[in-house]
């Protein structure tokens, strides 16, 4: 994009009155576009029509850290809410090298063939540090990115997983309001990011490679427990035996866990995203899941619980931040920690003291 | 103990002036004992001399939920602090049936033979519900309970794990001030109780039985990760093969984890608490650990981090409780949850609203 001229967009288009190429209406549109001074109403209207440019612009507002943008974003999200919720949100995770992008390319293309509109978002708490965000390199999904019915957005940068999560949750609402009915939320699995994605999706898909012992890592990190499906990718020709063995290993691992509240029994599937095999079976499985959880009401119940979780999470974070970021408390906390170290007080007495200080502010 | 008479202890002993059996000094002591009106100073003095009755009484003050008792308890704990900290705190966990009591009986007796003074405490968040607390049945440790140098205290009852943990942490300080230099903190492993015990001990010992596949449960629940030693109990005659296999399984499981910050490599040992075999090796291992972590300074560092954890934990709990127990917030929270369900607001907007309400109170 060109560097914006200091001259206003108005004077620019106004400098060519009666130009054969631009009718006054178009000029008005361009002006408005250049200034990016859409009202929330205009943006919302465009977005509800399924306009991807408006959707992208809305998400940009959400991702902005400017107070003014955040206020506009909130209005936009609130306007979008009654039109949202009509989708299935699928969390996709797996270690680097497992083939997430190739999988999303194949899976997303299949969904579009089925008449779906597919939005791909990402939660990547490392992107702000490394400046390399997942999904940032869209060429890895060269077919999907060209599709009219696909919307791909890299992970927002943020200074905390909580911040990234908030932005992604709100972006989900805009995507849904824009008529995207399958949402794929990708994460690379750093720290708590899988748990975060799990807490904002309806179905959680774990991508794995055939490889002995790997299932123990998944058990260890609590990821197997969250999975609704484990998909062993790269189950290509020549790799069948290892893939079948991995399937057995993961099936055994899944048996460690008590039945899920959703009444769904997690499945292990094989696929080759590269050769496009096993992809349609995965979508069939997810539809089977969706049917079950809509029938037994777990779908709505789970979304409600997720909303409650995010509400409490946001409040708790706020209460903590306000306490610990108070300059006096910062100093006093330091002093109390020293006193504990010197055996002059206990953790509990120190806590009581700090709270008293805080309350007297 | 007899039901206390309504007549005061003073008039009771005073009713027998010049009794041959009781000199005026003893009478005074009995009076004071019956009324339980020790000053904190008196109690502390007795406790610092290693008096088990005083220690028991101090812990009773800690466990009391009465405001007055809590104030006295806090003074007592503060007075004990400079004399505490000189111990090793060993966390012991394992599922019911693994033989924890038999193990503690054998291990504690061995420690006393080595000239140690041993206090046994328990963290059992279920005791308040089931009314059956662990260590409550002291006959399960019939030898240890008779030892002058042993102090055994059942789990305090409490309405929350946090409450039980606070009481246990403060009891630890009193035990240490009373000269007990090995503390065994037992837990049965319900919910988060292992993590809680881990966060208040120097060494974490996981008791296991020989049994194929069991190691996966430990990995799943994150317990293997915390263990400094895994002891396979009931490695008796006839059970050697299963025990050796279990040892290999757990060794493999331990290899899943990155090196510990303590620089200690967790070990797997076999023992039979019933036949008293393998017990001295466990104490040797713990001494080896202690030597390492005192040398590399992890011992002090870890206790400092634990204190910090408990300080922050206490503050966070308090901030949350105060918010959510506010009657207006309770009502408003309910309304906001309904609004979220009706797609009228988002979790984040609702959080913002509730915090604003809270701040205007």
Image (cartoon, coloured by chain):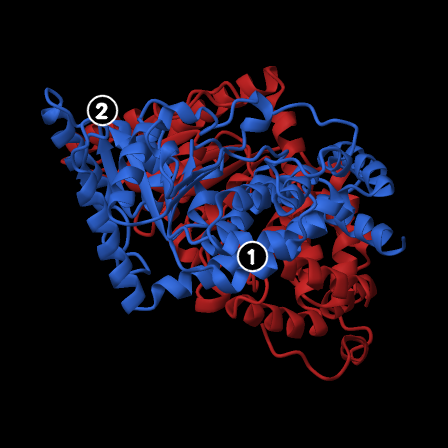
Chain colours: A blue, B red
As drawn, the residue found furthest toward the bottom would be B6
Q: Residue at x 25, y 62 (%)?
A: A292
Image coordinates of residue A138 in percent, x first then y, are 43, 27
Separation of disc 1 and disc 2 at Cα?
49 Å
Instruction: Give yes or no for contact between labels 1 and 2 (Cβ–Cβ under 8 Å).
Output: no
Residue A314 falls left or right of residue A107? right
Tell me residue A177's x, y (percent).
48, 56
Which residue is at a point 78% across and 78% down the rendered structure image?
A: B16
Chain for disc number 1: A
Q: Residue B149 at what x, y percent from top left?
A: 55, 42
Q: Is residue A191 left or right of residue B355?
A: left
| Residue A240 against residue B67 in the figure, above or below | above
Numbered disc in front, either 1 or 2: 1
Q: Residue furthest right?
A: A361
Q: Could you tell me which residue is drawn at 75 percent across and 46 percent down?
A: A68
**Quadrant of residue B222 within the rendered picture:** top left
Q: Secondary structure at mark 1?
A: helix
The chain letter for the residue carrying disc 2 is A
Q: Which residue is mark 1?
A: A45
The residue to which callout 2 is attached is A211
Of residue B29 and residue A23, the one placed in the foreground of this image is A23
For the residue carrying disc 1, how many other residues have a C-alpha within 10 Å: few (<14), some (14-19), or many (20+)?
some
Mark sitting on residue B200: none
Q: Secondary structure at mark 2?
A: loop
Nearer-N-terminus badge (1/2):
1
Residue under the point 59% across and 63% down = B345
């Amino acid at each position: 994009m060109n560097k914006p001229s200091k001259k206003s967009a108005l004077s620019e288009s106004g400098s060519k009155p009666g130009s054969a190429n631009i009718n006054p209406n178009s000029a008005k549109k361009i002006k408005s576009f250049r200034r990016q001074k859409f009202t929330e109403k205009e943006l919302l209207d465009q977005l509800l029509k399924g306009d991807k440019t408006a959707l992208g612009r809305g998400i940009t507002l959400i991702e902005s850290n400017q107070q003014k943008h955040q206020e506009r974003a909130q209005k936009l999200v609130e306007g979008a809410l009654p039109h949202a919720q009509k989708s299935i949100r699928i969390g996709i995770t797996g270690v680097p090298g497992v083939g997430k992008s190739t999988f999303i390319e194949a899976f997303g293309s299949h969904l579009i063939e089925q008449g779906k509109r597919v939005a791909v978002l990402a939660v990547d708490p490392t992107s702000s540090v490394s400046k390399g965000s997942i999904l940032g390199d869209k060429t890895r999904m060269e077919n999907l990115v060209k599709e009219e019915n696909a919307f791909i957005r890299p992970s927002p940068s943020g200074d905390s997983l909580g911040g990234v999560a908030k932005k992604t949750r709100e972006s989900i609402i805009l995507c849904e309001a824009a008529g995207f009915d399958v949402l794929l939320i990708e994460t690379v699995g750093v720290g708590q990011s899988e748990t975060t994605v799990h807490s904002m999706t309806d179905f959680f898909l774990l991508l794995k490679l055939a490889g002995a012992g790997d299932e123990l890592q998944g058990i260890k990190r609590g990821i197997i427990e969250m999975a609704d499906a484990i998909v062993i990718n790269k189950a290509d020709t020549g790799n069948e035996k290892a893939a079948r063995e991995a399937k057995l290993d993961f099936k055994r691992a899944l048996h460690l866990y008590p039945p899920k509240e959703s009444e769904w029994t997690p499945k292990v599937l094989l696929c080759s995203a590269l050769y496009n095999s096993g992809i349609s079976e995965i979508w069939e499985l997810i539809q089977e899941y969706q049917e079950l959880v809509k029938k037994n009401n777990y779908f709505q119940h789970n979304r409600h619980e997720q909303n409650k979780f995010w509400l409490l999470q946001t409040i708790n974070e706020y209460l903590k931040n306000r306490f610990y970021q108070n300059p006096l408390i910062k100093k006093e906390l330091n002093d109390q920690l020293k006193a504990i170290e010197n055996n002059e007080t206990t953790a509990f007495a120190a806590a009581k003291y700090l709270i008293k200080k805080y309350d007297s502010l």
